[in-house]
C-alpha cells in the first residue's frame, strides 16, 4: 500500500493505493452470490430484496444504518456445517462473531454447540436456552467470577489458556464439588496467512501455552494431576479469515505429536482435539472460500493420517466456525448523505454510519464490496471510497470500489458480508447509536437487537 506513516494512523486520502480495483465490474447491478446472502436478489423494478422484502420498505420501517440478516441463509449454513462434520465431530459456533438470543435459539434448533468467551456471552447463551453442556468457555483471562459461573452452570468444557488458569479452574471446581471438563489451548507455531492481529498460533501473542518450548507438555502434566479437572483434549486455533488448509495440516501434525507424547509419558490417550475456526468467507468476488463439506473432509483426512502414523486412536474433532456461518448472512444498509469528487483521485461517498458500525476496515484494512440497492443504474462506473460520518480521517467503510456515476444523496447502498464482527465490535464513538439487527425470513422482518436510542446513552451517564 502506498501510504505514508503518521502517528495518528495511515494517510488514506492523498494517493490511490496499489492493488485497488484495476477495472470496474462488467455489470454494476449484478449481485455476486458468493458475497450476498442466499435470498438476496433484485426485484423486477430493480430494488434489492432479502427474504422477500425490498430494502426501501426495510429502510422505511427500520431506518438506516441497519444490519439485515437473512435467517434462512443463517440456518442453512449452520445446518451445512453440522451435516458436513456428522455425528462423530462437534461444531461449536464462535459466539464472538455475533451473538444474540435469537441466534442462540437458531443454533440450538440446528444442532450446533456454542463457544463463548465472556460472562456476557455466557449469560446470553443460557438465557436463550442453550444447554450448558453444549457450551465451551474460552478466553485468555477469565475472571474468578466468570469461571465460577461457568462451572456452576455446568458448561461442557473450559479451554485453559495459562498455568494460572489451570490452578484457578481446578480450585474453583473442587470448591464447588465438581470435576470440570477442560481442554488446554496450545500455540503450535503456525502463522496463518492473514492479518497480523488475527493470526493467533505463532508464539509472540497472548493466546495459549507454547508447544515448542515444552510448556504445553508441562501444562498437561499439571492438569492431569489435579482432581478438579478432567482433561479431555487439546485446543489449537491458528487465525482468522484463512483460505489455505496447509496451516491446519501443520497444526494438526503438531497437536497429534503432543497427543502421542502424552500417551507415552502418562499412559493416557486424550479423546478430543479442537482445531478452532478461522475459515474465510467471500468479502469480494476475488475471495474463494471452501465449502463446509470440503473443510470437513480435509480436516478428517489430516487428523486420521497423522494419528495412524503415530499409532493413536483418532480423537473426536471439534471446530469453531463463527464468521463462516454468520458473516455472509447479513448486509449493512446505508443512506448516501454527501458525495465529493476529488479531481484525479476518487469520489468520496459519505453514509449515515461508519466505523462505529464497521471498525474492521480501519482496524484490519479489511476489504468489502458495495452496491447501489434502491434502484438500478446504467451510468458509467466511478471509483469511490465509502466513508462514514465520524470525526476521524480513518473512518472508512469500503476503501475502494465502483458505484454508478449518477449516485445521489438519498440513494440506498449496501455492504454485504457484515454479519460477523460488525455489530459485535460496534461502538458509540462520537456517541453514535449502534444500529439494529433485523432478521428477515419468508416475507417477515423482526428486530432481534434493537437500535440504541439517545435515552440509552443518557441512562448509562449517571453524572
Image (cartoon, grey):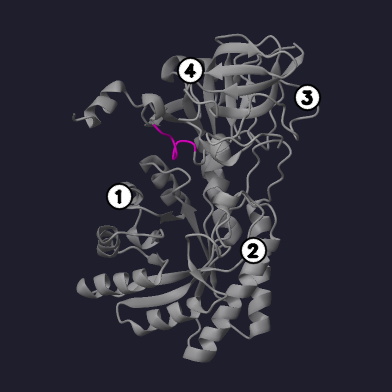
Q: Secondary structure at mark 1?
A: helix
Q: Is residue 333 left or right of residue 150?
A: right
Which quadrant of the view contains residue 253? Answer: bottom right
The tag on residue 59 is 4
Regarding residue 267, the answer to whether it shows in the image is no
- The residues tagged by marks 1 and 3 sit, at their Cα atoms, a distance apart of 46 Å
Q: Which residue is drawn at the image coordinates 48% and 77% (left, top)?
A: 215
For marks 3 and 4, the one nearer the N-term is: 3
Which quadrant of the view contains residue 248? Answer: bottom right
Mark nearest the camera among 1 and 2 is 2
> Residue 407's spot in the image, x, y percent?
65, 11
For marks 1 and 2, the one nearer the N-term is: 1
Vertical relation: 356 (above or below) 254:
above
Q: Which residue is drawn at the image coordinates 41% and 33% (left, top)?
A: 427
For marks 2 and 4, the one nearer the N-term is: 4
Q: Classify 10 Å Cα crowding around label 4: few (below 14), some (14-19), many (20 and above).
A: some
Q: Which residues are magenta?
A: 422-427
> Residue 256's spot in the image, x, y percent?
59, 77
**Residue holding disc 2:** 248
For marks 1 and 3, the one nearer the N-term is: 3
Vertical relation: 73 (above or below) 346:
below
Q: Secondary structure at mark 3?
A: loop
Number of numbered discs on residues? 4
Vertical relation: 104 (above or below) 113:
above
Mark nearest the camera among 3 and 4 is 3
Is 227 within the magenta? no
Amino acid at each position: 500500500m502506498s501510504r505514508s506513516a503518521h502517528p495518528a494512523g495511515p494517510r488514506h486520502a492523498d494517493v490511490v493505493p496499489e492493488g485497488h480495483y484495476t477495472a470496474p465490474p462488467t455489470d454494476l447491478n449484478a449481485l455476486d452470490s458468493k458475497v450476498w446472502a442466499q435470498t438476496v436478489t433484485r426485484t423486477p423494478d430493480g430494488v434489492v430484496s432479502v427474504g422477500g422484502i425490498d430494502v426501501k420498505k426495510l429502510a422505511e420501517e427500520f431506518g438506516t444504518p441497519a444490519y439485515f440478516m437473512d435467517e434462512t441463509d443463517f440456518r442453512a449454513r449452520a445446518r451445512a456445517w453440522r451435516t458436513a462434520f456428522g455425528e462423530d465431530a462437534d461444531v461449536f459456533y464462535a459466539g464472538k462473531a455475533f451473538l444474540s438470543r435469537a441466534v442462540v435459539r437458531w443454533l440450538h434448533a440446528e444442532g450446533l454447540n456454542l463457544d463463548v468467551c465472556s460472562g456476557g456471552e455466557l449469560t446470553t447463551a443460557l438465557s436463550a436456552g442453550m444447554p450448558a453442556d453444549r457450551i465451551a468457555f474460552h478466553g485468555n483471562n477469565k475472571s474468578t467470577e466468570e469461571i465460577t459461573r461457568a462451572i456452576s452452570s455446568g458448561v461442557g468444557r473450559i479451554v485453559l489458556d495459562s498455568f494460572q488458569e489451570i490452578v484457578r479452574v481446578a480450585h474453583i471446581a473442587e470448591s464447588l464439588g465438581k470435576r470440570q471438563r477442560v481442554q488446554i489451548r496450545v500455540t503450535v507455531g503456525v502463522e496463518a496467512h492473514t492479518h497480523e492481529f488475527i493470526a493467533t498460533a505463532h508464539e509472540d501473542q497472548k493466546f495459549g501455552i507454547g508447544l515448542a518450548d515444552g510448556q504445553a507438555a508441562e501444562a498437561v502434566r499439571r492438569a492431569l494431576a489435579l482432581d478438579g479437572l478432567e482433561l479431555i483434549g487439546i485446543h489449537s486455533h491458528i487465525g482468522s479469515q484463512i483460505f489455505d488448509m496447509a496451516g491446519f495440516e501443520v497444526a494438526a501434525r503438531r497437536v497429534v505429536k503432543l497427543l502421542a507424547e502424552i500417551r507415552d509419558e502418562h499412559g493416557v490417550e486424550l479423546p478430543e482435539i479442537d482445531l478452532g475456526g478461522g475459515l474465510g468467507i467471500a468479502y469480494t468476488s476475488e475471495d474463494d472460500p471452501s465449502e463446509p463439506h470440503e473443510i470437513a473432509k480435509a480436516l478428517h483426512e489430516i487428523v486420521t493420517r497423522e494419528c495412524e502414523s503415530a499409532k493413536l486412536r483418532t480423537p473426536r474433532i471439534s471446530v469453531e466456525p463463527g464468521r463462516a456461518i454468520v458473516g455472509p448472512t447479513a448486509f449493512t444498509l446505508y443512506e448516501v448523505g454527501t458525495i465529493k469528487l476529488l479531481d484525479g483521485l476518487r469520489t468520496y461517498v459519505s453514509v449515515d454510519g461508519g466505523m462505529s458500525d464497521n471498525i474492521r476496515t480501519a482496524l484490519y484494512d479489511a476489504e468489502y464490496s458495495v452496491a447501489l440497492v434502491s434502484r438500478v443504474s446504467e451510468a458509467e462506473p466511478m471509483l469511490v471510497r465509502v466513508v462514514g460520518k465520524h470525526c476521524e480521517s480513518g473512518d472508512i467503510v469500503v476503501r475502494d470500489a465502483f458505484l454508478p456515476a449518477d449516485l445521489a444523496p438519498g440513494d440506498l447502498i449496501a455492504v454485504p458480508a457484515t454479519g460477523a464482527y460488525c455489530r459485535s465490535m460496534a461502538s458509540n464513538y462520537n456517541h453514535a447509536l449502534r444500529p439494529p439487527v433485523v432478521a428477515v425470513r419468508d416475507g417477515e422482518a423482526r428486530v432481534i437487537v434493537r437500535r440504541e436510542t439517545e435515552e440509552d446513552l443518557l441512562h448509562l451517564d449517571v453524572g
